[in-house]
Amino acid sequence: MAKLVFAMNQSLDGYVDHDHEAFAPDPELFRHFIEQVRGLTGSVYGRGLYEVMRYWDEDHPEWNAAERDFAAAWRAQRKWIVSRSLESVGPNATLVHDDAETVIRGLKAELDGEIDVGGPVLARSLTELALIDEYRLYLRPVVLGRGKPFFAGPRPPLRLVAHDRIGEHAVRLTYVPA
């Protein structure tokens, strides 16, 4: 049975914002994310974050080796995109228009490993359905003052099960539903 994990960078004031330059991961954290993506069974994305991540679908000449590694890992993983507004999705992706709950429950039952949840709005919906098995908050010493909150709805009751430092500037807090 697969485990559904919601993991994202979070600023000290509780936001996620991948468009903010100050929020870019340092090399150690980026390498951690590359390895994490390589180990995933797949990812479930909401429309918004999926559109941001489509950046990795095409090579860019200015990329360094780590960026090329991340792009290769991201392209290789299976993706399920939950959206009522998208008409099509990119390579290695499946569009989920209706009954996302049934699809995700099926993925959890049929697959092994970890399935990443991409995006706080989707995570809120999956939290309300009690489908998320683990929350990983990567706290960074940045105050954004804006963006989407990590928890897009009320914070569910959680129990801390692990904490560790990733590089010089990030702490990963791992929680499970209480």
Image (cartoon, helix red, strand yellow):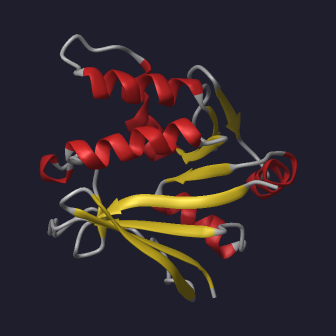
Residue 142 vs residue 39: left or right?
A: left
Q: Residue at x 71, y 74 (%)?
A: 130
Q: Quadrant of the N terminus?
A: bottom right
Q: Nearer the viewer, residue 21 or 135?
A: 135
Residue 158 vs residue 145: left or right?
A: right
Residue 82 visible to the viewer: no
Residue 32 visible to the viewer: yes
Q: Is the residue 176 above or below the residue 35 in the image?
A: below
Q: Nearer the viewer, residue 96 or 36?
A: 36
Q: Nearer the viewer, residue 7 or 173?
A: 173
Q: Residue at x 16, y 68 (%)?
A: 141
Q: Quadrant of the C terminus?
A: bottom right
Q: Is the residue 136 above or below the residue 32 in the image?
A: below
Q: Nearer the viewer, residue 33 or 132?
A: 33
The image quarter containing residue 158 is: bottom right
- Give the total number of marks visible in the rendering: 0
Residue 122 screen position, x and y as percent: 56, 58
Residue 78 screen position, x and y as percent: 65, 32
Q: Residue at x 20, y 47 (%)?
A: 26
Q: Residue at x 58, y 51 (%)?
A: 116
The image quarter containing residue 90 is: top right
Residue 173 screen position, x and y as percent: 41, 73
Residue 114 screen position, x and y as percent: 65, 51
